[in-house]
Amino acid sequence: MNGFILVAHGSRRAAANDEIAAFATSLAEGLGDRYAVVGHGFWELAEPSLEQAIDAQVAAGATDIRLFPYFLAQGKHVVKDLPSVLEQKREQYPQLSITLLPHLGALPGFADWLGRQL
């Protein structure tokens, strides 16, 4: 079963975290049938944590999870922290295939698309 997790930084402002949760729900509709389970997780300051989101998808039967970093740049979280968590989860769940997708700012055509929207 395929899973998809949108991971964002997390905020002390509950409204910001709620916005991410709502965005993940909207994104799930756009993803259609490509993923059986779609969720979100936060790096810090909010729940569900990335670890909790992965655990929940594994518990739901996901064996192949794609993780989308909702970050504009290759900061420490994208380059070091997220890959570290993925490695830990691969060890915890040897049957799990988990892939780190390109972060938002690295998506092909993103800058052009954004330029057209502004």
Image: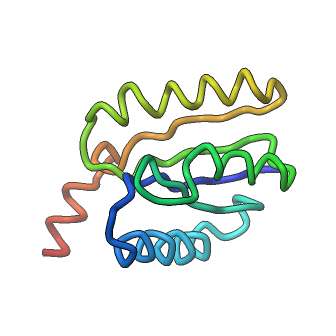
Q: Residue at x 20, y 55 (%)?
A: 111
Q: Residue at x 47, y 53 (%)?
A: 42
Quadrant in the rendering for residue 116: bottom left
Residue 19 occupies quadrant: bottom left
Vertical position of residue 22 compared to residue 101: above or below: below
Give the vertical position of 65 relative to 5 (above or below).
Answer: above
Q: Position of residue 70 (x, y in %)?
A: 39, 53
- The number of callouts visible is 0
Q: Nearer the viewer, residue 58 or 107?
A: 58
- Residue at image position (61%, 76%) is 29
Which is nearer the eye, 106 or 45?
45
Residue 23 appears at what percent x and percent y?
Answer: 46, 73
Residue 79 in the image: state x and y as whole percent. Answer: 36, 28
At 49% from the left and 48% from the top, the residue drawn is 68
Q: In the picture provided, is 52 more to the left or to the right than 61?
A: left
Residue 65 sits above or below residue 4 on the image:
above
Which quarter of the figure is the C terminus placed in?
bottom left
Q: How is the image coloured?
A: rainbow
Which image quadrant for residue 39?
bottom right
Q: Is residue 45 left or right of residue 68?
A: left
> x%, y% of residue 109?
28, 52
| Vertical position of residue 88 compared to residue 2: above or below | above
